[in-house]
Amino acid sequence: MQPELLCALIPLFPLIGFLINGIGFRHIPKGLAGIIATGAVLASLLASVFLFMAFVGGSGQSGNAGPLVATLFDWISVGDLHINFSFQIDQLSLLMLLVITGVGTLIHLYSIGYMKHDDGFGKFMAFLNLFIFFMLLLVMGSNYVIMFIGWEGVGLCSYLLIGFWNTNTNYNNAARKAFVMNRIGDLGFLLGIFMLINTFGTVEYVDVFRQATALPMGDSTIILITILLFVGAMGKSAQIPLYTWLPDAMAGPTPVSALIHAATMVTAGIYMVVRSNVLYSMAPLTLEIISGIAIATALLAASIGLLQNDIKKVLAYSTVSQLGYMFLGLGATAYTAGMFHVITHAFFKALLFLGAGSVIHAMSNEQDIRNMGGLRKALPVTFITFAIGTWAIAGLPPFAGFFSKDEILAHVFEHNKLLWALGVLGSGLTSFYMFRLLFLTFFGEFRGTDEQRHHLHESPASMTVPLMVLAALSALGGLINLPGDGWLSRFMAPLYENARKVNPEAFAESTMEHSTEYVLMAVSAGVALLAFILAYVMYISRRAVPAAETADRSLPEQVVYNKYYVDELYDTIIVRPIRGLGDAFYSFGEGLVDGVVNGVAWLVQKSAGQLRLLQNGSIGFYVLAMVVSIAAIFALRFFIRF
């Protein structure tokens, strides 16, 4: 099959699934709707695998092929600006295709069991398919405009899925918050695209990057473009200050949390920066800004996760923190390391969210870990797979998270020792709050109600099979880029040819000695292991349970538990002033506009009431009025010549 045809089929399959389920969700049986939706994404996965094999096989050597651009049709032509609707297939897009369709297929399968009792099952599966379609557009587009279509599309699907249970006002508010905060970031992204058009006269990746290499390093225009594009990434990938929407997005069904807010959508910002590696390699100032925001986000979110008691909120803040680590790697121009962590994070974070969903399913929708405990006996598969995911995200060997996080920290160490130390600290915090979550949920005595105890049961195979597959990927995923000359590093190397020309120092061979690298690995793993031991002592040996009442917490604990009151701060300095300004304009407009409209109506009504008296039915009066009018006209004509 021709690669161009495969390119068209990959996004087409989920679009067809969306149309079928979206139009007929009221009439299609739930079982058939689940098969259609899951089959559509599975078909995209198979097409992606065939495309990957064709790409690698056609290169002669793994990863050495140039990009394949498949133009579907001419789209926009305005003056000298021509934008094609076309797809670009290269190493980066292929990796994202495999992650999106692979993890997406597992989550669709999981959703069949998790959502089977929901009345809106068909509509839910249609929305999942629509999300996959837009995410595929985002990563397959050959230019920034198609990327922006997918960018906005996944934002729309996020709104629809977070507020899927729309009878709950809090869920609707969470969906609206996600939509609005993403629009703030998207404005920066859109301005960046406009600047690209103004500077280069094109939005095609190949043309933009070729022209950019002619500009000097640190060019102010490039810096401004990259900062604006990064503002978009801050919104989509939940970086300070546009991160508060993601924890609230846990209001959506758990498969939504796994698919959109852990494995795919939130990594769109990472993808955009890696795709634009030429521009960012030419903007050292932007890279420093990214590094600073990234480490601040990683530590802030990790510290908040220490005291959260909602099982999904802990994982949400973990996602924000891990996204910070990915951007930290990008700030050190470790683009491959950042993508490596995107891939491993997709495996273990999807696993953890789906494991949390299995727990919530067994606990009759209970999400507070203070009311759990001892679940490992009733949920053995969920426990084992969740433990593997926890070990992986904690960065402990030999699972996937250890290798990807270690590679990021090694690059950061060469770039900035302080950032490395802060990164290791964040790694320790991650290990502590994740093992805290594991111990409080699955160990100790059961703290729920008797009714919950009676209904405890392992999830069906449609939910546990995806858990087992993701657990295997979380354990073995690190093999794709082992230290040294890993496969992923070789595969992605051609992506950086232009960036290597403009900034050779950033891509120079590492001078770090192996002994130093081993010490760094030992320090990182040692800190994570100490955090594990501390969590074990507190929550297993001493059987500590978080306080149920806020009065039992110290002031620092209270501040951290309430997420540093960032939401309250935003509400005070942004939301309330804007709302007050809006109310003032509304009152002003209401008084002015309504006054004018009502005044005109009153004037017409009163004048008409008086003029109607002239219609009295007297012919003599009418003749007199005519004569007077004719005389007045002649007089005006004589004295005022017009």
Image (cartoon, rainbow, N blue to C red):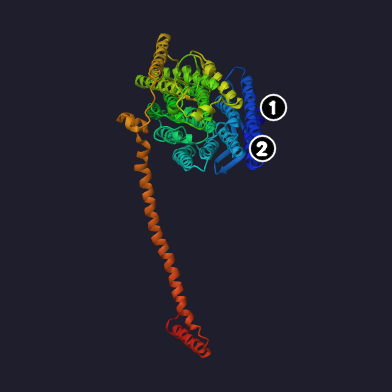
Mark 1 crowd level (few <14, some 14–19, many ≥20, 10 Å Cα): few
Q: Position of residue 262 (x, y in %)?
A: 50, 29
Residue 5: where, in percent of width, then height?
A: 67, 31
Q: Quadrant of residue 309?
A: top left
| Residue at the disc numbered 1 | 1
In this rendering, would 557 be left or right of 332?
A: left
Q: Nearer the viewer, residue 228 or 237?
A: 237
On residue 330, the disc is none
> Who comes first in sequence, dot 2 or dot 1?
1
Circle 1: residue type? Met
In the shown orientation, is residue 522 left or right of residue 385? left
Q: Is residue 149 visible?
A: yes
Pick whichever, 611 or 117, lies toward us: 117
Crowding near the residue tagged with mark 2, few <14, some 14–19, many ≥20 C-alpha atoms within 10 Å: few
Quote the CA–CA distance across marks 2 and 1. Answer: 33 Å
- Residue lying at the far left in this picture: please name it: 555
Q: Nearer the viewer, residue 273 or 558?
A: 558
Any part of residue 229 in sight: no
Q: How many marks?
A: 2
Looking at the rendering, which quadrant does residue 153 occupy? Answer: top right
Q: Residue furthest top?
A: 515
x and y percentages locating residue 95 in the rendered image: 56, 25
Q: Is residue 252 above or below residue 397?
A: below
Q: Is residue 103 left or right of residue 176?
A: right
Residue that badge 2 annotates = 29
Q: Secondary structure at mark 2?
A: loop
Q: Nearer the viewer, residue 118 or 583?
A: 118
